[in-house]
Amino acid sequence: MVVTIEGATGLGLMNLTWKPNPTPIDDAIETIRYAVEEAGVRYLNGGEFYNFPLDSNLNLQYIQEFAKRYPKLYEKVSLSVKGAFDLKTMEPDCSPEYLEKSISNITKHLPNNYLPIFEAARVDKRYPIEEIVKNLSKFVEDGRIGGISLSEVSADTIRRAAKVAPIVCVEVEFSLLTRDIIDNGVLAACEELNIPIIAYSPLGKGFLTGTINSKADIPEGDIRSNFDRFNDDEVIEHNLKLVHGLKKIAERKGATLAQLSLAWLRKFGEKHVKVLPIPSCSSARRVAENMKEIPLTDSEFKEITDFADSIGVKGRRYNEAYEATLNG
């Protein structure tokens, strides 16, 4: 079975379960149903560890329940799940033993014990990427996974991995707030190899929705309170210049700030290699907003890009300790 990345926008499932008060299961299933049946989403992105509490398998249980209630809709999507992340050490673990453990746990929640796309969450730097991909290829061969994705990797890692086995997609943070892949070679590598880019946090972890004006707007217990761009009011004040300018352009287009931000990513993909934004939301209303396609002309795309260039962005996207796991 050939796994492909289809549609203009996918759906991230993290925000359903990785928060102090997970979305009730019926509401979560309705959100996914609406996304697939009404909004035409064909790519879902979950995580073995997207849970509260961490060891609950809640995200997988929600996916399992969606497949049970709506088997025909489930068959329409390419599901990608991140795993191979040890919650005890809070580090990636791509040892052969842990890959087996992680993939077995994920697939037992899915129809026919089959996962379309598996993605190791970050790179376990104890093992060469060639060895990791070779070991993952065994799960493709035995029919438990359909293909391999990469997460937060460097351009060199992408090229080395692709020499061992086909890479279905590469998931990286990409938004008007975070455009690192343009300069660090990742975009160039994906273009060269024609590998679609899955853009996670396409709304800047909520910053590009216009709902964050100070660190006081981050709820208690929210994981973002640990990130540099959300726990320093001076950094937030600077980055709000980007938000305020983009909001003016969005209003001129009759769009929301979120819609404009997603439209920029889609247009970027038209000019380079396919970019699939995967905003994570927990209501059908928000899905409807995010999936509405707002066309951008070349001149509008340039205006937005030039404006973002003129402002720049301050603050790490995570923090110093966590960013050691990025660009593996």
Image (cartoon, rainbow, N blue to C red):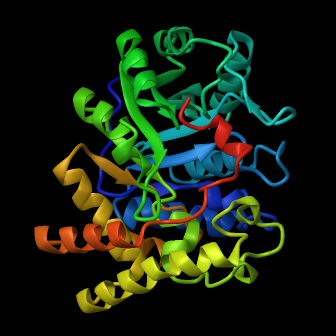
Asked whether, in this view, residue 254 is left or right of residue 19, the answer is left
Q: Nearer the viewer, residue 275 or 13?
A: 275
Which corner quadrant of the image does residue 205 belong to?
Answer: bottom right
Q: Quadrant of the C terminus?
A: top right
Q: Nearer the viewer, residue 238 or 217?
A: 238
| Residue at 57%, 34% in the rendered image | 111
Q: How many marks?
A: 0
Q: Quadrant of the N terminus?
A: top left
Q: Is residue 223 above or below residue 73?
A: below
Q: Nearer the viewer, residue 53 or 30?
A: 53
| Residue at 72%, 57% in the rendered image | 18
Q: Is residue 119 above or below residue 41?
A: above
Which corner quadrant of the image does residue 156 belong to?
Answer: top left
Q: Residue 229 appears at what percent x and percent y?
A: 63, 66
Q: Residue 4 appears at what percent x and percent y?
A: 32, 35
Q: Residue 312 appears at what percent x and percent y?
A: 43, 67
Q: Is residue 76 visible?
A: no
Asked whether, in this view, residue 105 is left or right of residue 281, the answer is right
Q: Residue 47 appears at what percent x and percent y?
A: 64, 43
Q: Is residue 179 above or below residue 2?
A: below
Q: Nearer the viewer, residue 316 or 293?
A: 316
Q: Is residue 1 above or below residue 25?
A: above
Judged from this view, the residue extending furthest toward the left is 298
| Residue at 39%, 62% in the rendered image | 37
| Residue at 26%, 27% in the rendered image | 193
Q: Is residue 43 visible?
A: yes
